[in-house]
Amino acid sequence: MERFRGKLMDGDRVLLDEIEGSIAIQEGPGVQEWRGRFWLAESSPVQPGGRYCLIRDDGRAGELTVESSGPDATGVQVAVFEGNSRFE
């Protein structure tokens, strides 16, 4: 998994302006799968089942669905996501 920084959009609205997380992208013939997680503030509006757009600081972007959110093993709030589109 590689680390990333970026922002999370809900349509035209910036939901989270600065996020950090990790992402794994797997490419195959005509297929791209990506998933990962990002860290959340406790008051974050991100909801499981929500569809958002991740825009990385390097300019790449893709649509994702948040699969779950909550504390990890260390107690830090995280959102786990899966990509819904090509990440370009």
Image (spheres, grey):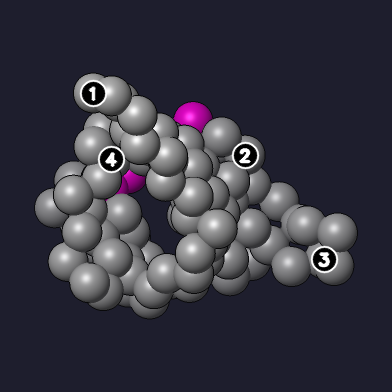
Residue at the (18%, 49%) spot, across then down = 88
Measured as percent of width and height from the top left, residue 76 is found at 74, 68
Q: Is residue 52 magenta?
A: yes
Tag 2 residue: 68
Q: Are marks 1 and 2 in contact (CB under 8 Å)?
A: no
Q: Mark 4 or mark 2, which is nearer the start of the sequence?
A: 4
Gap between marks 3 and 4 measured at Cα: 27 Å
Tag 1 residue: 30
Gap between marks 3 and 1 measured at Cα: 38 Å
Q: Main secondary structure of the magenta part?
A: strand
Instruction: Give the magenta-colored segment's residue range.
Output: 49-53
Q: Which mark is residue 75?
A: 3
Residue at the (42%, 46%) spot, across then down = 25
Q: Are marks 2 and 4 in contact (CB under 8 Å)?
A: no
Mark 4 crowd level (few <14, some 14–19, many ≥20, 10 Å Cα): some
Residue at the (35%, 36%) spot, across then down = 27
Tag 4 residue: 63
Q: Amino acid at mark 2?
A: Ser
